[in-house]
Image: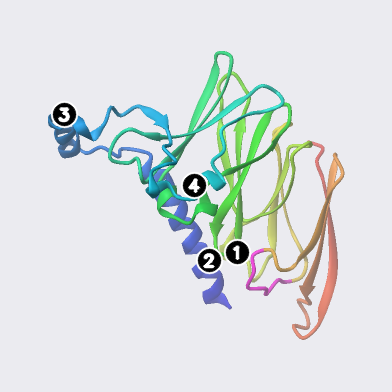
Amino acid sequence: MLKSFQLRKYIILLFYYLVILSCTNRETPVEKSVKQNHPGNGTGKLIPINFYDRKYEDVDFNAHDIITADGWKIEYLVKDDTTRYDDIYIKWSKGRTEGVYCGGKMLEFRRHFIPRFKGENKTHLFFTHACATSCTALLTLSKSDKPVERTFVKVTGFDINLGQVLQIGDYDNMLERFNFALIDLSRGIEKGFYFKNKCFSTDDTGCIDSVQFNGNSVEVFATLTDRKDEQRSVQEVYTVKLEK
């Protein structure tokens, strides 16, 4: 059981390490020299995805350019250089405000790792994507004057209208404390909590029965293993209040 938790932890960490690292300092001095001497490698600018190129097969299943009801333009792009088949970019803009998210190496994974637009509220755009075999991630892009991106992994529930996200906490203490974090993006509130009993499910969200978002509070219902008697299952409800 412990090995299973550790394996999922390392898979998720590896995925996001690749995503973050691949979008920073991609060009070494040697690569820069090669690019300067071989203009055919591309302009280095962001360009639309050529879906007629077979190397982008099925990418359009998740990567849909749209204009949202609130007037935000969402574009899926690639960079016109040697990373065109590795990284995918999401540009979101309205008027003079725009931001660019880099999904490093995402085109090398299965297509469900590409963030797919799910909806919006007054302050954020929401996208879902995979982060491991049984892991769901949520990407949020803010509509502020200085747009900010944020990714939540191991998400067990979210409410777009309320701008609230519930995610599993630290894997290191998972077997001792089934811990969570509740984030309210609109109000800038974050609350951590944990259940009294244990979760031994091999699925990240296997112990959670349901999540109810009520605005100023969130109720999380779970079927867990009794801490005092591991042969016994118990139902537990935790209510998180969001007042600062």
Element type at marker 1? loop
Determine whether, in the image, residue 93 is placed left or right of residue 45.
Answer: right
Work out whether mark 3 precedes mark 4 in sequence or the reverse, and give the earlier one: 3
Residue in the picture at 51% in, 26% down: 99
Badge 3 vs badge 2, beta-carbon distance below 8 Å: no
Magenta stretch, residue numbers: 198-204
Taking depth in this image into account, of 52 and 79 the one nearest to the observer is 52
**Residue type at the position of mark 1:** Ser
Which residue is under mark 1?
134
115 versus 68 height, above or below: below
Quadrant of image for the C terminus: top right
CA–CA distance between discs 3 and 2?
41 Å
**Residue type at the position of mark 2:** Arg
Classify 10 Å Cα crowding around label 1: few (below 14), some (14-19), many (20 and above). few
Which residue is under mark 3?
36
Work out whether mark 3 precedes mark 1 in sequence or the reverse, and give the earlier one: 3
Find residue 175 and report its horizontal and vertical position in percent: 64, 71
Which residue is under mark 2?
8
Find residue 56 and report its horizontal and vertical position in percent: 42, 46
Element type at marker 3? helix
Q: Nearer the viewer, mark 1 or mark 4?
A: 4
Which residue is under mark 4?
59
Badge 1 vs badge 2, beta-carbon distance below 8 Å: yes
CA–CA distance between discs 4 and 2?
25 Å
Residue in the picture at 79% in, 77% down: 226
Magenta span: predominant SS is: loop
